[in-house]
Amino acid sequence: MNEINLKLNQEDLIIKAAELIFNSKYLVVLTGAGISNDSGIPDFRSSKDGLCTKITPEESKNIFKEPKIFWKIVKLVGPNLIKAKPNLSHRILANWQKDKKLKTVITQNIDGLHQEAGSNWVLELHGNAKEFSCIVCHSRFDAKKIIKSHKENEEHLPPSCPSCGGLLILNIVMFGQNIPELIWMESVSEAQKSDVFIVIGSSLVVYPANQLPIYAKKYGAKIIIINDSKTEFDEFSDIVLTGNSSIILKKIDKFIQKLNNKSDF
C-alpha cells in the first residue's frame, strides 16, 4: 500500500482527498457501475442481478439479429433504467462541475444519470442505453419512446429510424465491440491533462477503461480510488477509500465546503 494510506486512517484520508480536490487545477473523474448502485441499478457483474449473468456474449453480439434476444435485453435493462434517478454521488459531481472544480466525468455506465443530475461534460465510454442511434443519418432517439411504439411480437427488429428508415441500434457498446475512437481519444487526453484523477465505483477490470488511471499517473496526476471493494490498482494509487461512494463523497464534499469558506476570508 502507498505511504499515505499506511499512515492515515479512513477519516484522515477523506480530509486528504478533499484537500487534493480543493487544490486541483484539472480534476477528472472516472465512474463505474458502483456509483449507480444507490439508484437501484445493479453492477454489470453482480453475482445475482448483473446483466452479464443473464445474457451470454453470443447473445449480446446478436441483439439486433434475433428479436427474442432484443426483447430479452430490453426487459432486463429497461425497467431499472427507466425508474432510476440520480443519487447523491451523481449530484455532488454535477455540483463540482457547476462550480468549475470538476473538468470532466468519464463513465463506463450506460444509464445517463450523470447528465440527468446536471453534469454538462460527460464522456460515455460504453454509450447510453436510453438512446437509439441511426446508422444511416446518425439521428438519436429516446429509447423508451421507440420501444413503446414497437410491439414485442413484431419480427421487424430492430425498429427503423423514424427520419430515414435506416437501421436503429441501441447506443451502447456490447461484448466484443470497441469503444468509439473519438470518445476514447478524448478520454485519454483528459486523463493525461489531469492533476487529480478519481475513480469512483469501478473495479477497474474492464479494458481499456482501466488504463485511464495509468495514463493519468504517468503524466503526474494524484490517483484517488473510491470503491466498495479492493481493486488491483489500489497499490499504485495515492489514496484509497473503501465504502459506499455516496457516503464517502458526502464527507469529502462537506470538507471541501469548509475549505471554500476559509478561502473566502
Image: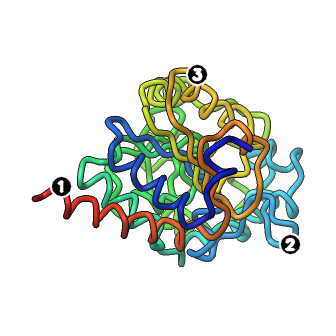
Q: Is residue 118 left or right of residue 155?
A: left
Residue appearing at x 69%, y 50% in the figure: 6
Above or below residue 21? Residue 136 is above
Which amino acid, by three-letter code, is at mark 1?
Answer: Ser
Q: Position of residue 31 (x, y in %)?
A: 56, 51
Q: Which mark is residue 263?
A: 1
Which amino acid, by three-letter code, is at mark 2?
Answer: Lys
Above or below residue 222? Residue 107 is below
Label 3, residues with CA under 10 Å away: few <14, some 14-19, many ≥20: few
Whichever of callouts 2 and 1 sits on the residue coming sooner in the sequence is: 2
Assign a secondary structure to mark 3.
Answer: helix
Q: Is residue 229 left or right of residue 82?
A: right
Which amino acid, by three-letter code, is at mark 3?
Answer: Lys
| Location of mark 2 (residue) | 48
Of badges 1 and 3, the one in the foreground is 1
Instruction: Indicate the quadrant containing the C terminus: top left, top right, bottom left or bottom right.
Output: bottom left
Assign a secondary structure to mark 1.
Answer: helix
Alpha carbon separation for disc pair 1 and 3: 31 Å
Alpha carbon separation for disc pair 3 and 2: 37 Å
Q: Position of residue 203 (x, y in %)?
A: 73, 51
| Location of mark 3 (residue) | 218
Above or below residue 190? Residue 92 is below
Of badges 2 and 1, the one in the foreground is 1
